[in-house]
Amino acid sequence: MSDLRVVPGPLDKWRCGTCGAIRRRDTDGMTNLFETNYDLYAHEPGRVEEVRRQGGYAQWLASMLGAPASCFEAGSGNGSLLLALAEHWPHAAMRGVEPADGAAAAARHAGLEVTTGYLRERESGAATAELAIAVNVIEHTAAPLDFLRALASHGDRVAIVCPDGSLPNSEVLFGDHLHSLHPEHVAALFAAAGLQVERAERAPRELGYFQIVVGTRGSPPAEHDAWPSTDDTASYLAAWRSLDDTLMERIGDTDVIAFGAGEAAGLLRAYAPLAWSRVSACAVDAPDVDHFGELAVVDARGLEPSAMLLAVRPAVQATLEAKLGPLGHRVVRWDDVIPR
Ligand SMILES: [Zn+2]
């Protein structure tokens, strides 16, 4: 799950033979996930890593969109993105809706107008915002077109940010990502919702494999681009299937410290369980949490030379080895097995 819980069961992702979109076949049991157990954002906004991440999104969105008079966010979590956007758009009226009550309550406590609930069509007479956004939400929805139509009822202009499925990446490993969409698929959804696409771009690489599509109500073009013809998601998933064996060979007969306590650590815990059973603790520089699951999170800067399993995304493993190796750590990388 994208809140890093491990739920045993098949990943159950299926790729459409016509358009190449990926969806989870069985979405039962997923629909209520965000109301109760989902706790990714059930805390006050302000954690260091969260502020850094949302600040990156806000900077990107502000550079793409220009300041609106009012902004509505669907799936606003604890309000951390709205707060980051407010730094760029100090005069914009901000509001949102969020199904996880703990997160919505944290957003209200931070002074934001966030209601608890799922996104619904705007009721007649209710105000629209100049801009309606949803960041990393549509991939969780069982019916993305219904979601987009409902979002468009709240704003004159709509921006969707979601994982970019055109480069197979870790987003497909999350069971609660019910859809993996290429830019062509998102553009087709916009057209079906009566939205004219203004801009469609990939995120700056430092944010990860994401895309943004911006549209306004208008007459969308009748034709869309051809569907993507090739897709190497199957080989990407096969690489993840082989990772545990490879890591066990590389770790050898010893315990390791995992460097990292975020998304990559969660993926290793789920998809390389044998290797993860050798992890005695997680380490990061200047931790602001004290545990990751059952494991203690310790400050990496105070460690004796150790065997270290990198639990960070592949793109930064070479840099990290260059930093940790000279300190005497034996570093286990896996970016040759999983390049993204
Ligand atoms: Zn299809």
Image (cartoon, helix red, strand yellow):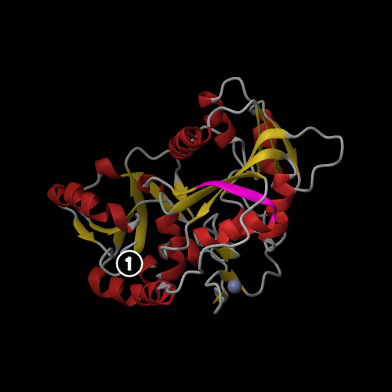
Under mark 1, the amino acid is Ile
Instruction: Name the one closer to the observer, 244 or 230.
Output: 230
Position above or below: 47 against 199:
above
Per the image, the residue denoted by label 1 is 338
Query: Residue shown at 36%/48% (left/top)?
Result: 205
Position above or below: 255 against 159:
below
Instruction: Name the one closer to the observer, 57 or 160.
Output: 160
Query: Residue shown at 66%/74% (left/top)?
Result: 26
Q: Is residue 195 magenta?
A: yes
Coordinates of residue 267 in the picture (x, y in percent):
44, 62
Q: Is residue 35 visible?
A: no
Query: Residue shown at 61%/35% (left/top)?
Result: 79
Taking the image in four quarters, ligand 1 sits in the one at bottom right
User: Which residue is situated farthest in the bottom direction here?
Assistant: 17
Instruction: Name the one closer to the observer, 280 or 244.
Output: 244
Image quadrant occupied by the N terminus: bottom right
Q: Quadrant of residue 191?
A: bottom right
Coordinates of residue 324 in the picture (x, y in percent):
20, 49
Q: Quadrant of residue 285?
A: top left
- 78 displayed left or right of 316: right
Callout 1 crowding tier (Cα within 10 Å): few <14, some 14–19, many ≥20: some
Q: Is residue 332 visible?
A: yes
Figure disc tally: 1
- 72 displayed left or right of 247: right
What range is drawn magenta here?
193-199
Coordinates of residue 117 in the picture (x, y in percent):
76, 46
Image quadrant occupied by the C terminus: bottom left
Coordinates of residue 160 in the picture (x, y in percent):
58, 48
Secondary structure beneath label 1? loop
Position above or below: 52 against 18:
above
